[in-house]
Every structure is written in structure tokens, then in C-alpha cells.
Image: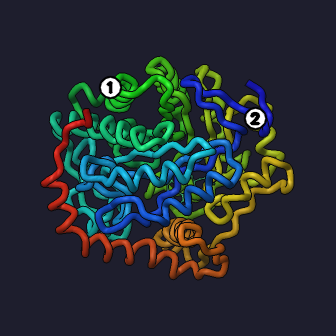
Amino acid sequence: MAAILTDPLELPCGLVLANRLGRAAMTEGIADRRNDPTEQHERLYAANARGGAGLVLTGNAMVDRRHLERARNIVVDAATDPGALRRVAEASAGTPTLVQLSHPGRQVNRYVNSHPVAPSDGPAVAIAGAFAKPRALTRDEIDEVRARFVDAALRVVAAGFPGVQIHGAHGYLISSFLDPEQNRRDDVYGGDLAARARLLLEILAGMREALPPETAIAVKLDARRGADDDLAELGRMLAAGGIDLIEISGGNYERPEMAGYDADGEELRSEHESPFWNSAAAVTAAVDVPVMLTGGFRTRAEVDRALAGGVCDVIGAGRPLAVRPDLAGRFVAGETDTLDRPGPRLGGPAPVRRLLGAAAGTGWHRIQLQRTGKGRPPLLGFPALLAALDYTNVDWAQALSARRSRMRIAEETPRSTIS
Ligand SMILES: Cc1cc2nc3c(=O)[nH]c(=O)nc-3n(C[C@H](O)[C@H](O)[C@H](O)COP(=O)(O)O)c2cc1C
């Protein structure tokens, strides 16, 4: 339905967003060695809550400490310090903040995890030999993944957050199940769209059954070229399963479309600022639940067009708000007409850009998140190459140094859900 940025929005669960700007999930990597939340998270999410967006999504928190996306992710399981999680929830109070829950699947470098899993045996992520070949999950392991997502959602809500987002995008595990190129299973979890979506729908059903009805459950999905009909159909299935918000983005490590690049490191060309515009429009037309479109928005004119034209109900913004959380409020209030995105552009030949461009960009923005977490202003002059090295090498070193203790905690941690 046509809307303007300052319109409030009530999600089906009853949660009310004060406006139509959502702060998208951005991985922080600032948990402690036990993967518990820290004071840096408290400061960062207090800043986001004050920032003026109607909705905040946290960076991806992992449901299984044997399967991290990066060394210092938050993990939500039976070994998580509930007090640390509660303090982040308290810090974020005032603006609905949903914790993004994720399993990385095959997209984890070999230093963090040399035994990644995926829907099917398949090739490693093809970047600089840094990723190990994933093996297919067994049926029992799929059951465990589902139980872990539900368990983590219960813990997040018990900590005081109003809900969660299931990460079904950007090439991680749930996204791989949905992707016909990645999922070649011949059991009930592979095949047609309904089968590929089974794990996601079972997670949603498990959460809906276990959580109070006023809990918000959102999902983030990938737009895939030529697959908008499937995406719309998936939206219908999720709506029937009780989803509250469907966020559309796209891209993965090998095709970093979310960062605005194609597989060759060339800038994406699209008719709209967001390359996922048409896909979001297809889902919005198919479902009654709110749709959020994330990726590429920079100008008020384009934001207004998307909302007024019924392309989506909420605009997602990531990188602009990584640098300045309060830009959200200034943009909504009309004090500025751009969601400007300072950040490095890595030059050089295509292979270098392909190898380092996404890591430099994402790494640079993550440095800014960390600075907010430390109570410091953004550092716009931070060099791109250093950001890429920090994003990769520092992470690997931290992962290797904590690996043994992490696996010991995983061994000792019961997998049952909280009663
Ligand atoms: C530093 C950084 C970390 C990110 N981490 C996540 C994440 O944890 N989960 C996720 O779904 N997307 C993640 N993304 C993608 C963003 O949510 C968003 O989809 C993307 O940046 C495109 O939006 P934008 O053009 O407004 O930045 C990340 C992006 C950046 C820059």
C-alpha cells in the first residue's frame, strides 16, 4: 500500500514501527571470546535505538557455536550469558530491535571453520582458497538446526527483545537451502520450491508455536535473477505461516550484489538505486504482510517513489547508518535528502577489486560500527586496504586463537530448549 516515510506501521503481531526506515543487519564482530554480547553491543544498539529508524535489525547472531560466520559473532545457545543479552535488549529499548539469527552454512572461511556444512556436498566458496568444501547436512542435523533456531529465538525473547529475524539471505545456510544451485538434495528438503523452503517454514512454524503471539518474526530473503515468481510464491508461503515482515535483499560472497558489485567486481547497473526493486515489488504484490527493501537506497526521491508506488512498505538502509546511526532520524525528519554513503572505493584491476573490493567495503563499515560501539566518532579516513586486512586476517587470528575453547564449550553445552 502506498505510504510515506513518516507513516507508522503495525506489523501483524501488533509491534508498531514509528516510521518506514529500517536499519539493516550488519555483522559487528565485537562479542567476547566466549561469543557473549559486550558493552560495545550495548553502546552500538543504544545509538541505533536513539538514531531515529523505525526498526533496527542486529548483526547476525549464530545459533550454533561450532558454525560461526566470523570469530566474534554473538552466539545464542544454552551457554550464552542471559544477563549480557538482556543488557543489549535494555540498551535498545525505545526502538523495536530484532535479533537476526543465522547459520553460515558454507560461507565461513576455513580458519574459522574447516568443516562447513550445506544442504548438499558442493564446491567451496571460490575466493582465494580461503574456504573449505562443505559437506551435506544429515537429516538429524537438519532437525538440530531447526531446533537451534527456535531455541535461540526463545532466549532472545526471554532477554527482552520484541522478536527475531531469520537470516534467509546472502548465501548463508537457509539461503543455500532455498537456492536450486546449492540445494541438490533428493529428500524432502530438496527439489521444488516447497521442498527447498521446508526448513525455513519449519523454523517459522516452530517459532510461532513456541513464542508468544505478540513476538515479531521477520525473515530476510534473496532476490535472484529471473526468479521473482518463486520469490513471490515463497512470500505467500511465509505469510501463510505467520511471518510479520519480509525483507528483500540479494547477493552473496561470490556475487556481492548487496554491496553493489557483480561477480566480476564491476558495479551493478540497474534502473533503480536498489537492484532488488522489481523483486520486492513482486513480493509486495503477492502478500498482505509488510515488505522491506534493502540495498542501494541513497536519495529521498527514490525512497519516496518506492513507498508511494507500493514497491515496499519499509526502506532498509545498512551502510549509511553504519557510519552515522543518527542519519536515520535526520533523514526521516527531512533535515537531509540523502542517505549518503561515505566509504572506500578500491581501485586497481578487476581481479584485485573482485578479491578485495567487498572485504574492503564491508570491513570499512564494520570498523565504523566498532567505533560507535566504543563510543568514538566515525573515522572516514580509514584506509580501504587496512579495512580489508582487518576484515579477513584479524578475524582469522581471533578465530584460531579461540577455537579450542569454543569447541569445548560447544561439547559441554546442552542442546535442549529452555523450559
Ligand atoms: C559491515 C556490513 C555487515 C553486514 N552484515 C550483515 C549481516 O550480518 N546480516 C545481513 O543480513 N546483512 C548484512 N549486511 C548487508 C546489509 O544488511 C545490507 O543488505 C547491505 O549493506 C545493502 O544495503 P545498503 O546499500 O543500505 O548498505 C552487511 C553489510 C555491511 C556493510
The kind of residue on which mark 1 rests is Ala
Q: Residue at x 68, y 30 (%)?
A: 9
Q: Quadrant of residue 184?
A: top left
Q: Quadrant of residue 44?
A: bottom right
Q: Which residue is labeled 2 in the image?
A: 307
Quadrant of the rendered image holding ligand 1: bottom right
Give residue 54's position: percent from left, percent from top.
Answer: 67, 42
In the rendered view, tell whether residue 291 sits above or below residue 174.
above
Q: Nearer the viewer, residue 365 or 160?
A: 160
The kind of residue on which mark 2 rests is Leu
Q: Residue at x 43, y 66 (%)?
A: 30
Give residue 280's position: percent from left, percent from top.
Answer: 62, 34
For numbered disc 2, what is the local secondary structure? helix
On the question of residue 148 being in view, the answer is: yes
Task: Give the farthest residue toward the top.
Answer: 240
Label 1 to label 2: alpha-carbon separation = 33 Å
Numbered marks: total: 2
Q: Nearer the viewer, residue 145 or 93?
A: 93
Assign the N terminus to one quadrant of the image: top right
Give residue 93's position: percent from left, percent from top.
Answer: 57, 46
Numbered badge on residue 58: none
Q: Which residue is labeled 1 in the image?
A: 195
Q: Residue at x 53, y 28 (%)?
A: 244
In the rendered view, tell whether residue 108 sits above or below residue 144.
below
Does the Cβ of the disc 2 residue fall within 8 Å of ligand 1? no
